[in-house]
Amino acid sequence: MSTHTAFHPSPTRSPSTVAFASRTGTATYMSSIAANRVNGAVNGQPKAYDCDEDANCVEVNACDEEMCRTTLDVRIHGEWYDLSGWRKAHPAGAHWIDWYDGRDATEVMDAFHSEKARKMWQRLPRSTEATAVQLEKDVMPDTSTQLAFRELREQLEADGWWDRDYVHEAKLLGIFGSLVVGSFATAHTVPVVSAVLAGLAMTNAGWLGHDYVHGVDKFCDKMRLFVALAGGLGATWWSDKHNKHHALTNEMGVDEDIATDPFLYTWAPDPKHDSPLRKIQHLIFYIPYYFLIALWRVDTMQVIVSAVEEKRTSAKSRSSTPSSLTFLPFNVWVPTTLLSGLTSALIVTPTHQS
């Protein structure tokens, strides 16, 4: 991710105002709106919430001896909810909640969560009326297109379009398996053919793993580690990286699919962060493309370490394991990784950055 870009989760507040406000006011960074959002009260004994992983919440005091917790308000299907007590219990990490502070998260809730989770959010505490009124003045209202899309989505799901086609899944896995078998069969006799087949298999594993990591049904739950076993990429890393791409598409500082500098630039950067290679990147783009999979594996390990340190739910069980293709001979495995990086990048770049 670019180090010189910044992301502000709310049009009305900076990130430093999201979680806490100084009780004494001697070092507060809160905006005027956030100052009125200490859980619905500024004077007296303001209340906050603590929630467990099942979204069961209890009232607690918002203030301790040093500071007061501010609300963290997110709009879902037209209702504002205070998620300040839920953020730490959120299985995918508190950062997801923080990014949507003061924003609408309806599409993310519907698309990224299981049927069980989509019922849970209705148990979360609602924002105070005063807070909701203030936020509605600052946040774009739902458009007729958004409302029509949500209605269409519900209808498609009710009609069975979301149901899993296991015959089709078997075909896709069969193609992947055939490439792997062919690669191992030719590894010691025709290494060039083996590398090509293994590279295609690894790329195929990425696309299958994409769907399994993003899926919210029981089949995908069981297949979550496929991308690690077949492609050497961690499910936790993939979920973080690509969910951000789908949820916060093209937002600088968050969507890592557009954060390709200093190797490739998708827009003209600040001059102090520019590179002379940018002028010829259209001639040398294929060189960094080759290293895409290798870079993703490094990112995977970094995310795993961070997730375990933060004690995120299922971080250890979703850690990366070496790809089965690493058991190929070295003279096949190295070109396989490079070829898979090239083919993956040739597909990802035009479809994600066009």
Image (tube, helix red, strand yellow):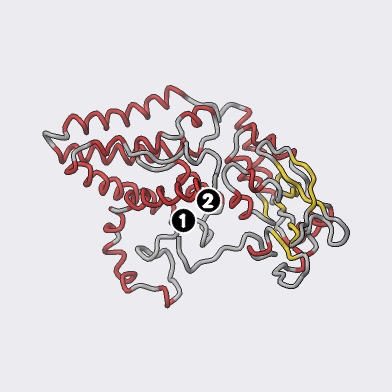
Relative depth, front residue between 261 and 169: 261
Instruction: Using residue 11 as the reference point, say whether residue 280 is left or right of it.
Output: left
Name the secondary structure under disc 1. Answer: helix
Instruction: Using residue 174 as the reference point, say whether residue 304 is left or right of it.
Output: right
- Which residue does the numbered mark 2 point to in the structure image? 244
Query: Outermost residue, front direction?
Result: 65
**Disc 2 and disc 1: Cα gap in Å?**
8 Å
Query: Outermost residue, left direction?
Result: 189
Q: Position of residue 79 (x, y in %)?
A: 76, 47
Question: Mark 1 and mark 2 in contact (Cβ < 8 Å)?
Answer: yes
Q: Position of residue 267 (x, y in %)?
A: 44, 67
Q: Quadrant of the N terminus?
A: bottom left
Q: Residues within 10 Å of mark 1 (few under 14, many from 20)?
A: some
Q: Position of residue 160 (x, y in %)?
A: 58, 26
Relative depth, front residue between 23 and 261: 23
Q: Quadrant of the C terminus?
A: bottom left
Relative depth, front residue between 155 and 298: 298
Q: Amino acid at mark 1?
A: Glu
Eyeballing the image, is 124 above or below 138?
above
Identified at 61% across, 50% down, the residue is: 94
Q: Which mark is residue 256?
A: 1
Identified at 79% across, 48% down, the residue is: 60
Q: Amino acid at mark 2?
A: Lys
Instruction: Using residue 110 as the reference point, say whether residue 56 is left or right of it.
Output: right
Eyeballing the image, is 11 above or below 305?
below
Q: Position of residue 61 (x, y in %)?
A: 80, 51
Relative depth, front residue between 54 and 223: 54
* Mark found first going from the N terminus, 2 or 1: 2
